Image (cartoon, helix red, strand yellow):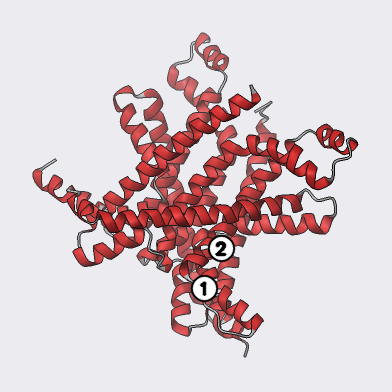
Amino acid sequence: MSGAFWQSVDLSLFWEYRRVLLAGLLFNVYVFACSATVALAVGLAAALLRVNRSWPFRWIGTVHVEVFRNAPDYIMVVWVHFVLPLLLGALIGRRLELHPFVSAVIALGFVYSGYFAETFRAGIQAVPIGHVEAARACGMADRLILRRIILPQVVRRMLPEAVNQFVSLFKATTIVSLIAVPDLMYQVSMVTATEMRPLPLYTGAALTYFAVIYFVATGVRLLSERWRNKIYA
Amino acid sequence: MSNWERLVWNQRGVLLQGLAVTVEVCLIAFAVAIVGGLTLCLIRMYFRPLRHIAIVLIEFFRATPIFVQLMWVTYVWPELFGWPNSFFTAGWLALGLQSSGYLAETFRAGIEGVARGHREAGYSVGMSPLLVFHRIVMPQTVLTVSPSIVNQFTVIVKSSTLVSVITVQDLMFQAMKLVNVWYEPIEILTVTAGLYIVLVFLVSTAGKMLADLLRRRYGLAAA
């Protein structure tokens, strides 16, 4: 390892632009939070369709899961950004344009809803049927059974799997830079374009993402494990 | 002449060319991932001096987003190591590295899942450690991890859309090029998305059938 090597690895450039880059990272978190909300809501709805008693609903749920689980994130982001506004615009007869942020949240939310739907479904089906029957025997309404009996068990059971999916979702938020959402990767490529020094910038970005994802994921896994142990005892 | 015919059917040559590049990138990346993953896993488990380096590499590959890693390999590696020298190489290399991290952990879980008694039985009949690994541990590991390996291959196919960003002319690249020529994204992007969905669906279905077949043929009780 020569001096020239360390000179080129020198991350001071990364430090110099810390304001912009930090703002970019925050944008990643922002996109993540919004699309995770969408993914959880849509995923739960799809899972409920998949365990529905009548087959047309089950079928819709299955199609939803298969389409979104098999679709690459990138093409879905591009499709939602460029095609969806045209289709919706034709429907309401007006020109429509989606803000890149909105497109990103819709696309990532729907793609990951497919994964969350499967996790929810596995959790729901693992609840013993006796619990539901007992609740029904007490005269609980279906909605109340879902909220009081099924969901609390599902959440605990699906937590480890869900943490993995949240990690994947956070990693996927880096591609929103490709439709010009100003996240960390976007800022890095902008700075690279002016400074012409990709090495420190991309290395810094990779290390930053690694640190954030690795430590936050490890921490969350630890906490969720503890919480699960406390409740299951 | 409908839009579908003009924008999709008449461009089928270009799109199929892109699809061929996608398949090529994915297959090379898959091979790299399996070889790299197995190497990392074996180093981590059996070669003490380099164990920590392997762990750091595995964790780094696993915890960095694929897009970031792709840009890093493409723009930083040539400066650091003088390689890779083409975008195509950088594309499969980044995809392969990312998956090798995941596969290393998959292999490790598989190897650790082999019952201790099986290994001991091998030693007690006088097999050498290498023979035990080759005849007893590996066959069982391949059976248990085959579904995860297939799953990882679908992840590679899905991530391969990103190599279009570094101008590798895969299906996604050709589709975006057509969009930029005609300014009519609806048909092209819908068909491309559909193609990808079908491709991934076929890969995962075929993989599941293969894994089932392996299990039925070579039986794996309670695995």
The residue wearing badge 2 is A106
Mark-to-mark CA distance, 2 and 1: 10 Å
Residue furthest out toward the bottom: B1
Identify the element where label 2 is drawn. helix
Q: Residue furthest left?
A: A3
Residue located 53% across and 58% down the image: A108
The image quadrant of residue B61 is top left
Rendered location of residue A124, percent (x, y): 73, 41
Query: Foreground: A173 or B49?
Result: A173
Q: Residue A134 at what x, y percent from top left?
A: 86, 33
The residue at which mark 1 appears reads as A98
* Residue B39 place in picture, x, y as percent: 39, 35
- What is the chain identity of the residue bearing mark 2? A
Indicate which disc, 2 or 1, sits on the residue closer to the N terminus.
Answer: 1
Label 2 with label 1: CB-CB less than 8 Å: yes
Quarter the N terminus of chain B occupies:
bottom right
Task: Tell me residue B129's x, y (percent).
Answer: 44, 18
